[in-house]
Image (cartoon, rainbow, N blue to C red):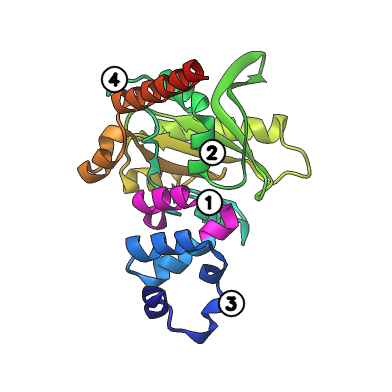
Amino acid sequence: MKSFADAYPEPDILQRCVAKLPWRHNIALLEKLKSPEQRLWYAQQTLENGWSRDILVMQIETNLYQRQGGAVTNFERTLPQPESDLAHQMLKDPYSLEFLTLSQDTQERELEQALVLHIRDFLLELGVGFAFLGNQYPIVVDETEYRMDLLFYHTRLHCYVVIDLKMRKFEPSFSGQMNFYVSAVDNLLKTPRDERTIGIILCRSKRRTTVEYALQDVYKPIGVSTYRLKQDLPEPLQESLPTVEQLEMELNSAIAVIETQQDEE
């Protein structure tokens, strides 16, 4: 309580977000963050998104504050205000996909299937408002079928969101492919009630200037971001995450306890 009082000396703190959080959430904010600005930001995000304490801690440890709004986009030119600001803040860079266990030589289709298998975790990382519509989503143009990796609808921005997955660094040709997908969705799926479709290219790495040049003359709203797998995380954070073997051991132990209790009954 003394630490709480020292951290928030302002008299109006009872009217702010930290006073509306459970005590264990506030303990996590005090223990893991030194910056008052970041504490208030995470507290507000917790209220808006309904995070549990464990989710709050995970977001702090994966540095969501620094990652939010970090993607390179052309939204300022292609979307009206304030929609462009909201869309930009929707994107992160990098996206934290440490909940996946993938090898270095994983193919894009395997990454897509892993994200679909762990769709709840992926939706949590994407943020509030994303509704999953499908993977390998088909669109037909000139009697030719094309398939988009992942298709979502954003309930706050009221628009379709196309996500294209790449297992390598960004290349300028990626923007042309995404521009085609966004145009097709705008013409084939979008209704007058929907806002402009947004495209997100998720790649292993990117060079900012290359991305800016690739998007410079593109008039569909597209953002480019990177993702971080478990093996890409800093060593201290990797050590804090359980391995597959540890999870299997814990599961087997839990099963053994249940079986013992059933035998005793």
Tell me the residue at 32%/68% (across/down).
34
User: Does 101 sit above or below residue 23?
Assistant: above
Q: Amino acid at mark 4?
A: Asp
Give the CA separation, mark 3 to mark 4. 51 Å
Which label belongs to residue 123?
2
Decide: few, some or many residues near mark 2? Use Cα within 10 Å; few <14, some 14-19, many ≥20. some
User: Does 128 sit above or below residue 178?
Assistant: below
Residue named by callout 1: 51
Q: Name the dominant secondary structure of the magenta segment.
A: helix
Outermost residue, front side = 264
Q: Amino acid at mark 1?
A: Trp
Q: Of 253 and 81, which appears nearest the observer?
A: 253
Coordinates of residue 123 in the picture (x, y in percent): 54, 38
Coordinates of residue 205 in the picture (x, y in percent): 31, 38
- Residue 111 located left or right of residue 22: left
Q: Nearer the viewer, mark 3 or mark 4?
A: 3
Q: Nearer the viewer, mark 4 or mark 1?
A: 1
Q: Of 85 and 9, which appears nearest the observer?
A: 9
